[in-house]
Image (cartoon, rainbow, N blue to C red):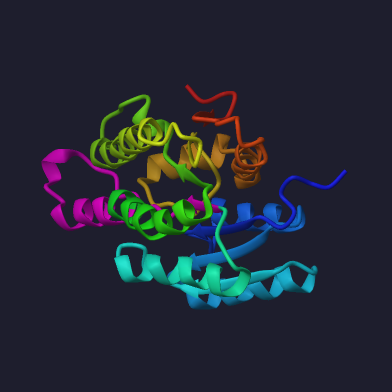
Amino acid sequence: MTDPLTGKVVAITGASSGIGAATARLLAQRGARVVLGARRADRLAQLQDSLRADGAEVAHAVIDITRAEDARRLVTTAVDAYGGLDVLVGNAGVATLGPLADGALAEWSDMIDVNLRGVLNGIAAAMPVFLRQGHGDFVTTVSTAGLKIVPNMGVYAATKNAVRTLLEALRQESTDGVIRTTSISPGYVRTELGGSAETRSTMDAIAIAPEAVARAVAFAIEQPRDVEIGDLTIRPTVQG
């Protein structure tokens, strides 16, 4: 049987490492045509070359997802290379942890710009293509940080919960079957996402591989069009 991911055009933000890179590898292995987007040009080129060496169809765009024009360029790259876009995986994210009393305005703004504004930019860029085609999926990385609120993660959790709310609103606006939305909430995953020394210590001790989240992305988008996977939570079995 043909793999349901074969031929799907999937653009991924935050694709240069961690969950984004693992998702790109898995989807490419299963026959999807992958469009990589991130800020680090060298990492993107290396990943693209590696995937192409294995026979995958891959394109990339060096982008800053906080810029609306860059989000549009990622979508345009997909359309120009492969004639359309089936899925936008909104995975780019940053985290700076600390008490609200620190008043870390610059770091807070960065999280808002990447984690929330970046998702909005992606939706605005991909939506016209999805509506024109009559189908499209938004699969977005959220976080268990928004499900269990803990000290020192308030702003990060707030950005992730804002995205969760946003996607639920989009789901309710899209019950005609054209747009599907999926929120994936990982717990501790071995990535380069920033954090405190305590967070890094916990991550090193219990974190799961980013490939686990990649499999969840694949599961969501391989469903038949009449099935929408709204929310997935993936965490280490020993995470509290």
Q: Nearer the viewer, residue 180 or 89?
A: 180
* Drawn side of residue 132 relative to residue 10, left or right: left
Q: Residue at x 49, y 30 (%)?
A: 230
- Residue 104 drawn in magenta: yes
* Drawn side of residue 33 relative to residue 109, left or right: right
Q: Residue at x 75, y 54 (%)?
A: 6
Q: Which residues are magenta?
A: 87-114
Q: Nearer the viewer, residue 106 or 75?
A: 75
Q: Nearer the viewer, residue 151 or 213?
A: 213
Residue 156 point in image, percent of width and height: 29, 42
Q: Residue at x 25, y 57 (%)?
A: 110
Residue 19 point in image, percent of width and height: 55, 50
In the image, residue 112 sits, relative to residue 147, either above or below, namely below
* Drawn side of residue 162 relative to residue 34, left or right: left
Splitting the image into 4 quarters, where does residue 78 fall? bottom right
- Residue 197 drawn in magenta: no
